Image: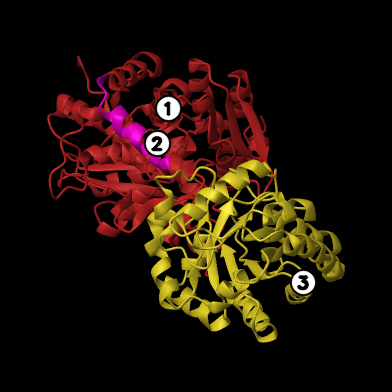
Amino acid sequence: MSVSSRLSDAFAKPHPALVCFLTAGDGDTAANLDALVAGGADVIELGMPFTDPMADGPAIQNANIRSLGAGTTTKDVFAIAFEFRERHREVPLVLMGYANPMIRRGPEWFGSQCAAAGIDGVICVDIPPEEDEALGPELRSFGVAPIRLATPTTDTNRLPQVVEGSEGFLYYVSVAGITGKQQAAQASIEDAVARLKKATDLPVAVGFGVRTPEQAGAIAAVADGVVVGSALVELVAEHGREAPEHLKALTASLAKAVHSAARAPRKEENA
Amino acid sequence: MTEQPNSFRQMPPAKANSFRNQPDERGHFGDYGGRYVAETLMPLVLDLEREYRKAQADPEFQREFDDLLEHYVGRPSPLYFAERLTEALGGAQVWFKRDELNHTGAHKINNCIGQILLAIRMGKTRIIAETGAGQHGVATATVCARFGLPCVVYMGAEDVRRQSPNVFRMKLLGAEVVPVTSGRGTLKDAMNEGLRDWVANVHDTFYIIGTAAGPHPYPELVRNFQSVIGNEARAQMQDRIGRLPDLLVAAIGGGSNALGLFHPFLDDPDVKMLGVEAAGHGLDGDEHAASLLGGFPGVLHGNKTYLLQDEDGQITEGHSISAGLDYPGIGPEHAWLKDTGRVEYTAITDEEALEAFQLLCRTEGIIPALEPSHAIAAVAKRAKEMPKDSVILANLCGRGDKDIFTVAERLGVQM
């Protein structure tokens, strides 16, 4: 499997990984992404703006609207990714978004552009395993990891199908709902991660509703990674050009909490 | 007509090489359809499909559906020969399937009856829906009142303002109407908000989708519930003139009334079909809602289909004088029927629809909704080109009470 070693390296560090999300084209994305890296983010998740972000709450919806309103195109998103890769050779970069902009020019085009821009993985919200052929085969052929989502509604019967064909890491959506809203109970996250890790050797990162260093630290104690999105996106909205310093400060406090959490116990053989 | 078939069980059986055996077991109509939903919803749509298959096989479900259609909705709807319109056009005989006479004034209620029975079977205790002009919202609020279930209807803020009579109707029926300001506050944004609600309330909520679109099995089950239109029309035509019509015509927004009429006839090779999209101010510019004629295949709201979109796959807004047609997508079965060539598609402008609206008022004493006015305009064009012994059957899918304010404004009349 030609999965990027950047992603596996990020999850092989001696501490859990902090995954930080921003919407491409919302504000000075290059400066904002650099601030995340400077603050200690282990993985960067870059949102592709879409007119109809059905899984997102108001914070990320508004970021999509701002980005598209500023004229961001798919080519701009790849340019942001390519330039990020030029500046940061080692930091894994994952695209997150919705199916339509990804398949508009054909999945081959999208896969090849991802590879050329140094993108390590793609999270597509509305391509479940049942529709994998719409994008998955092309991503794999270009060595880009299709990163699947598991949710509280993903039952045990279905889990093997979700895990099969997922690469890089498994993204656990900790609440049945949209981004940036309520946080799941810590106990439910712990149970869910344990259930997922019985089904896969992939690292498990937990996201949706994670806003504070305290929450992130608690989740990091039971998972391989923690994803923070809306709280960062709100800083971009609030501070505009001044956003980088605020992003760096929040990322640093999140990273401190995540990195100092006890590493989740690795899955035992045949456990 | 005793024991007139009302049920979707009573469609003529599909043949091996049939146009009527779509979708496949994964919900695909050729390349279209499917289940492009977030993982949170995936187990739910699988569950819905299982429950729907059981309902299809359950005579009690069919009995209840048929009974409600007959005694609550008022089916079968009449098949009517429009004599004066035919004379005025001077060509083919024009017949109408009178679905505007249904309870709530449109075909939407057929589907809502079917879906709320499914919701009850599944033990769901809360109903949500999206609506554009408000017809589907009213139909959903109606069945929720009938069965005593709480109902939340998402409606674009701009539509709430423009369609205040329907908003009041929904409230009278006990529904909560939520104005949607996210995105651009239109029907597609209302659907996004419906999906966001559903994903956060999966345990107790059933989403009654208003047209033959969305993730599988919605396009199939909405089509089947609406096929009562075509099944009745088929039998009524045989009864009245001893043969099937030469041409079927129906307006298309999402496409459920058209599929309901067309589907039972798809394997009758002598019956031609014409779907009529909204050309708005014309197909040349961006001000139209013709997804098939002016859009490209893509993925939105759970299915792959033709969409109004730009070169980056960003969804663009539809425009039509008819709020029920200005959705930037279309049911996936229409996408497939277009590509296979079985159904022909055309588009009618706002102006042409307005003329047809007035023509039907004056010639037949029927005030049609602006949606079927598009179909009537297409009928007017085709009838003139066809011999007098040929037969056109158009679906009069809604009545025009809701549209009189829009029409008055366009005609420069102060009310």
Residue A203 seen in the figure: yes
Q: Chain of mark 1?
A: B
The vertical placement of A160 against B117, above or below, is: below
The residue identified by callout 1 is B122
Q: Which mark is residue A32?
A: 3
Majority secondary structure in the magenta region: helix
Give the extent of the magenta segment. B45-59
- Is residue B48 inside the magenta stretch? yes
Are the residues tagged 1 and 3 within 8 Å (C-beta)?
A: no
Q: Callout 3: helix, strand or loop?
A: helix
Front residue (pair B238, A77) = A77
Determine which quarter of the picture holds residue A42: bottom right
- In the image, are marks 3 and 2 on the same chain? no
The vertical placement of B164 against A79, above or below, is: above
Q: Chain of mark 2?
A: B
Q: Amino acid at mark 2?
A: Leu
Question: Residue B263, position in %: x, y?
Answer: 26, 40
The residue identified by callout 2 is B48
The vertical placement of B279 against B284, above or below, is: above
Label 3 CA crowd tier, 10 Å (few <14, some 14–19, many 20+): many
The vertical placement of B188 against A17, above or below, is: above
Are the residues tagged 3 and 2 within 8 Å (C-beta)?
A: no
| Chain A on-screen colour | yellow
Residue B366 seen in the figure: no
Q: Residue at x 60, y 61 (%)?
A: A50
Are the residues tagged 1 and 2 within 8 Å (C-beta)?
A: yes
- In the image, are marks 1 and 3 on the same chain? no
**Counting residues from the N terminus, which is met first, the one under dot 1 or under dot 2?**
2
- Asked whether, in this view, residue B239 is left or right of residue B193, the answer is left
Q: Amino acid at mark 1?
A: Met
